[in-house]
Image: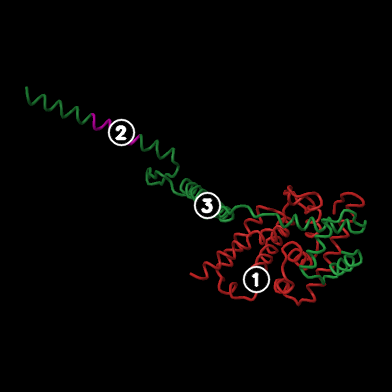
Chain colours: A red, B green
Amino acid sequence: MKNETQYIELVSELRNTIYRLVLSITSDSAEAEDIVQDVFERIWLIRDKVLNSTFPRAYACRIAHNLAIDRERIKKRRQTFSVNDEITTNDITISAELSDIASITQQAIASLPEKQRLAIHLRDVEGYEIEEIAEVLGCDNTSVRMNLSRARSSVRERITEVLNYGVKRY
Amino acid sequence: MELNDINRLIDKYFEGETSLAEQRTIASYLATEERLPKEHIPIKAMFEAMGELKTIQAPQPQPKRRGISLSLIRHIAVAAACVVAVIVVATRTMTSTTLHTEPMIICYVDGARVDDQQKAEDEMRRILGNMNENVTLAMARIDKVNLLKTK
């Protein structure tokens, strides 16, 4: 019973976070919704483990990240073998309701290597502590900071390009 | 805040070393400072963008459709098509086999087997016709006898 209450609280707290995290990987809101439901189903199945971990929300983010990455891999494999289907790319605006610069930033983050993308998203968008991010990435705090540094520099470079020279496609 | 201090904080940010509180300080400076140095403009855009990304909300959860998944429907359709194909092929094979190897009518004429269906049917009609004629004649004779008896 206590676990159920804690699980519900975790879901309420993390629903938007997990959605944003997954969206940053899939770039497809319908798919992100689907994955979010799968994530919470999975967390339900191992709720004792998640709730008793040092950083429950980091654990949840890790599950979400892994699920989203797996789905993307499967999607890319299907696109490679598809003959007639149009191959979609990541250079379309992910969220139409965001401002141009936010869309560009979102795309810049989406194009980063996996660990850098996760680090900057969890720190600068979600406000996670370095230790939590280390838990999600499966590395130490120093590596997290290094990934953050590289990610932020890349994103700043991209935004500077856009502001100086206008919108460019990747 | 002094420009030198903010520059130091921003450098620290890009080294990945700032605390969340320090990041909030940077954000606050960038949001409120009216005359930003040129090099801080992209950083301001970056911070604003991150803030905006945080506003994305998950849509309201819909009840997950519990039922047969699309891939399972596909598998079932393929399996059903195979079963139908097998039945059609088997039926046609059986029918074809029946027509060509199992004659419907067999008869023997003067001791010889007749497999040709048309010839067998003709022979059958001839025999039945003869039988009919003979029965009619016999019935007529019986009637005649009965008539003679009553007179």
Residue A59: which numbered mark, if any? 1
**Quadrant housing residue A76:** bottom right
Q: Secondary structure at mark 2?
A: helix
Between the C-alphas of marks 3 and 1, the distance is 44 Å
Between the C-alphas of marks 2 and 1, the distance is 98 Å
Q: Mark 3 — residue?
A: B80
Q: Given this view, does label 2 or label 3 mark the residue nearer the observer?
A: 3
Q: Which residues are magenta?
A: B126-136
**Quadrant housing residue A63:** bottom right
Q: Nearer the viewer, residue B32 or A45?
A: B32
Q: Secondary structure at mark 1?
A: helix
> Is the C-beta separation of discs 2 and 1 under 8 Å?
no
Q: Given this view, does label 3 or label 1 mark the residue nearer the observer?
A: 1
Q: Secondary structure at mark 3?
A: helix
Whole-percent x, y for residue B127 in the image: 33, 36
Q: Residue at x 51, y 70 (%)?
A: A2
In the picture shown, does residue A148 fall above or below B61?
below
